[in-house]
Image: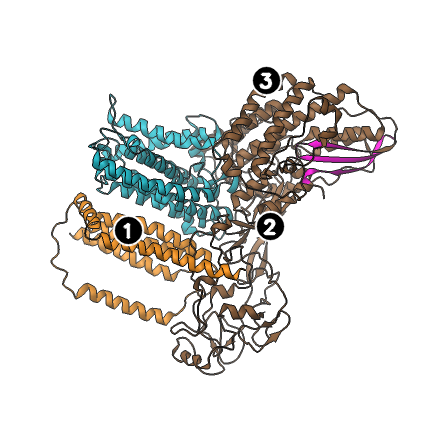
Chain colours: A orange, B cyan, C brown
Amino acid sequence: MTVQMIFLAFFGGAAVWFGVVVFRTHSMVRSALALLFSQTAIGAMFLVMQAEFLGVLQIMMMATEMSVMAIFMVMFMMDPGGMGKMDMTHQKRLSLWVGVIGLLAALLLVWLPDWGPVAQSVPGAHEQAADLGRELLGRSMLIFQSAGLTILTAMVAATMVAIVPNAEQRK
Amino acid sequence: MSILVVLLSLAAGAYALAVIERWAVHGHLSLTGPAWAALALMGRESLLAHKSDRLFFELGPVLLLVAGLMAVAVIPLAPGLIITDLATGALFLNAALAYVLVALIMAGWGPNGAYAMIAGWRFLGQFIAYAMLIVMPITAVAMRAESLSTVEIVASQAQLWNVLYQPVGFVLFVVAAMGLAWLPPLDLPDATGELAGGVEAEYTGVRLAVLRLARMVIILALAGATVTFYLGGWLGPWLPPWAWSAIKILAVAASMLSVGRYMPRIREARYLALSWKLGISLALANIFVVGVIALVVPI
Amino acid sequence: MTIAGAHAGAMTGLRRLISTAMARDLTAFVLPGASVARSMGLDLAGSPLRIVGTPRHANLLIVVGPLPPGLRDAAAVTYAQMPRPRAILALGAGDIAPLPDADVSAPLTRAGLRSGLADLRRVIAAGAFRADSGEFNAPALEVRVEYTCPMHPEIVRDAPGDCPKCGMTLVPRETASDGHGGHGGHVMPREDRPNPADHAHAGHAQDAGGSGAYICPMHPEVISDAPGKCPKCGMNLAKAEEVESHGHGHGHGHASHAPSAHGDHAGQDDKAGGSGAYTCPMHPEVISDAPGKCPKCGMNLVKAEEVESHGPGHGHGHGDHGGYGKQQDHSGHDGHAGHGGHSKAAIDGIEPHFMSMVEMTKDQPRSSDGLQMDWIKVPFGPFFPGLPAGLRLTLTLDGDTVAASDATSLVGATDLMDGPQMRVADFVERLATMMPLSPVSYRALACAAIEVAAGVEPDHDARRGRAAAVERERIASHLNWLAEFGLQSGFLWLAARAGALQLAVQGADVAGIATQAGAIRRLSRRVQAAPLMRMRLRRIARIGKDAPASGPVDRARGGGSDARTGDPTLKDLGFEMRVRNGGDALARLRLRCDEIAQSLDVIAAAGRIAVPQVPDVDRVSGEGEARIETPRGTASLRVKLANGKVVEADLDTPTDVNIALVETVTAQQELGDALSAVASLDLSPWEVRG
């Protein structure tokens, strides 16, 4: 149990530290990849908590997502290497407030509700994967399918919104 | 103990692949070539580009090697001969190989050179092409095996190998695997004729040796994955299981390395178009067909 | 015995082992290029060397033939990029300054190569490490510091100061002394190069001017007829309709915004609400009571209350990674349009001096799909694998699409004569050696021109022999092109096979060629049928029917001309002009394969090959002109003889015509396609005049 807690604390600390690096660094790519490693640390936390499928999934998805984010940052931001001295942060006070409020809300959510007793044993990984599969294709199918379709629709809509006005502007 | 055996066979396999790759690229077959080359690389000066992102420059090859090793960790060479038998082995393989992308982005961005940077971002474009195609065939394979564990997947092929059961998935997986390992004809990040070596060009000395070793390990991992998912892993008559694994993995890796010699590089736009329009449709159809067959046919 | 490029360190046991390893694992980088080496008869691929495409991976620099003066600086840069220990092998090269003296010199023959390599192995094994190895210095490697504005990289000054456009302090930047690098892209091993990642937009043109009223984005009352600077804040004036349609600007420009919106600023962070306060558009925390310069970046300060909040100008999504060449795949959208329909009203919560990236980059040129991306200027220098050796191609890349291109030759043939008059034999020899990729054709051209000038007629057999020699060179040249194309497109089997066949054909007589003919025809069939070849080349590098072109590039458009059609000798031998339709790179490939097949037939019909002989001219005077169809196109030479010596000569080459097509074929192409396009033109930088 304690070994688990130590690893949990270690990965949790790593996640927080990488998160801080995201904002401290001037380089866009470093920022994106620091976020990537922060998410990987969270995935590792899942693994430590013996949620194998979730952990592996988190690690896999975040690698690819953050890399795509990295290239978008390079494409659209000036000075992606962080070599200039420009201060690229905006709305500092607002974001500080939002961050603090969010943290308080998260802490309240962690401490206040009754999450039930701590599980003494966890089902084996094979069983977890099988149960997860049944859940996804059973009770939660509607949620996941609609979420997937919504995301796809949003992507297509965003692209359409971006193209159409310009096509008219370009005579 | 089994970990040690697996790692040693990995080293031997990587060496064999280096010999094959040297033949595929330069046309000379020399058994001691890679050994001399590795030794020579150790002694060479390490050049560092000015104003490079030092962290990424150093981290790129190391992360590539780590990704390769993690991927190899779930490949079974014989019953019981596997570094770790995770319940989600197939997915873990994919997760580890996703870091190949991260490593190449670092290796492209780090050295502060135009060729490397273009190469790194091109790999991202290539990734968008192969990403779906490397996961969807695995889905179909896991469906048949009713498990994500690599050992179970091999065991499920006892009566019929997946290459015959799901040939479409096999083809898609192999092509996507070549894209992941940036093997020709999908070697956009490394194109000699277009980018003078791309991401590899900025590395010299020991770092280059690590990069090349990492690439061999990744190719080996992908060959191992192909064999595990489609070619029946260690299954086969007469010879002991580890021999079958070795033969199959080396054969697959050799063909992946050599086929690119006989084809020009594919254009990036074309690769993306083919992967998304043709590839994903085929992959979805494959999943559907495999699902139907798995319900109906009792093998 | 040590090598000039030895690595620092004493020779210990381990290092001795490593030196032996290096001697056995020779990786070579060839100057000026493998294609030139093959044309000179050298079989580098057959030797135990490994030829690599970048000097960073090489430990041996092979100089083949004398180094042209235009390539010396580039050679020095290439050598400097090789990690030590590094050695130089000079084959028939003579003086190779500014490179250090060659470690091993050998004549330019196959035997010379073998003996040179053997010597080199001994030298490297013994002398790879040396306790006191020095640095390599050359004038081309010197570095110069220039000053540039982070926001406007086209402003470059030699001394520190302020940017005339925005007022920011110029930042120092190191750059090559002559402004360009040698081997493409890797300019300096230890020095900086203008980093694409460093600054946001590199190397683009100044703002375009134009008609229409210009107003200042922050002071709508300032109206001017010409572009310039706002007298109030120093910012560049923008076109009136642009300011309107964008709907925002940092410091807006429209009179339409309601005065009440100012009230929204009252609670904004980081800003003093007092009147007359000045702040920096990029650093809102800088407040000053008087106009001046921002202490952080040097920009002119702007009045705080005139700056109005507005919605974010960027953050639109773009579906696929930009720059995949096929512009129709892009959603061609303007940088601002990501929030199409955005209102002009102030939006709460967004800080006032919001410097929208899109707004800041508004004056910079946009790519054809409207997406503003990072532009970088990348040289594909004279020794790039797959491109003709000696061609410096500078591409301005917009993402990975080519926005602009510039092709120059570093080895161009400028002086045909080395004095006021030359002996005929010397002139012919000079012209032939000037063109290492097709010496026989130019020798034939020179001989023909002199014969016309002197009124001498070669006999029937000599003419047939000469025609066969030119056709043999055509086969060799097209095979050479196929080999280089194979290298460029990653088709390594083709590169190896075509190179081997070229070497076999180059010096062979008719019988020898007949034995190779079968293999050559099989190669050309196979390359046309190769999987993915059509996909790679179809519709790439298309040129229209009216663009001037020469040679196979011209005849692949379904028409064109061939200097051989008027030649009775060739007509006897069964020559017919071959043509292909399509005008793209695939058509050119097929046409060159057709021409190879036809040349094989002509040689078989001719029966014997005779290298063109210098005509015997007594002290005649006269003028003459001749034309010949070189493998790359029509070349014409005009000579003037006086007293049996050549006094004047004028040459037109096909590459002079074709090199102008580089711009057309690379425009808006993805990088790989652009390079294939340039390769398909089969340029010979040695032929570029002036």
x, y percent for residue C410: 65, 42
- Mark 3 or mark 2, which is nearer the start of the sequence? 2
Image position of C458 with respect to C552: above or below = above
Name the residue beneath numbered marker 2.
C142
* Label 2: element kind: loop
Is the residue at mark 2 from the same chain as the one at mark 3? yes
For residue C628: magenta? yes
Q: Position of C72 compared to B279: left or right? A: right
Question: What residue is drawn where x is 73% and y is 29%?
Answer: C443
Is the residue at mark 1 from the same chain as the one at mark 3? no
* Chain under disc 1: A
x, y percent for residue C585: 57, 38
- Type of secondary structure dominating the magenta stretch: strand
Q: Which numbered disc covers residue C515? A: 3
Amino acid carrying label 2: it is: Glu
Amino acid carrying label 1: it is: Gln
* Label 1: element kind: helix
Question: What residue is drawn where x is 77% and y is 28%?
Answer: C447
Observer-nearest residue: B114 or C214? C214
Q: Which numbered disc covers residue A58? A: 1
Question: What residue is drawn where x is 30% and y is 28%?
Answer: B246
As drawn, the residue found furthest toward the bottom would be C275
Q: Are marks 2 and 3 in contact (CB under 8 Å)?
A: no
The span picked out in magenta is C626-655
Choose mark 1 or mark 3, whichever is in front. 3
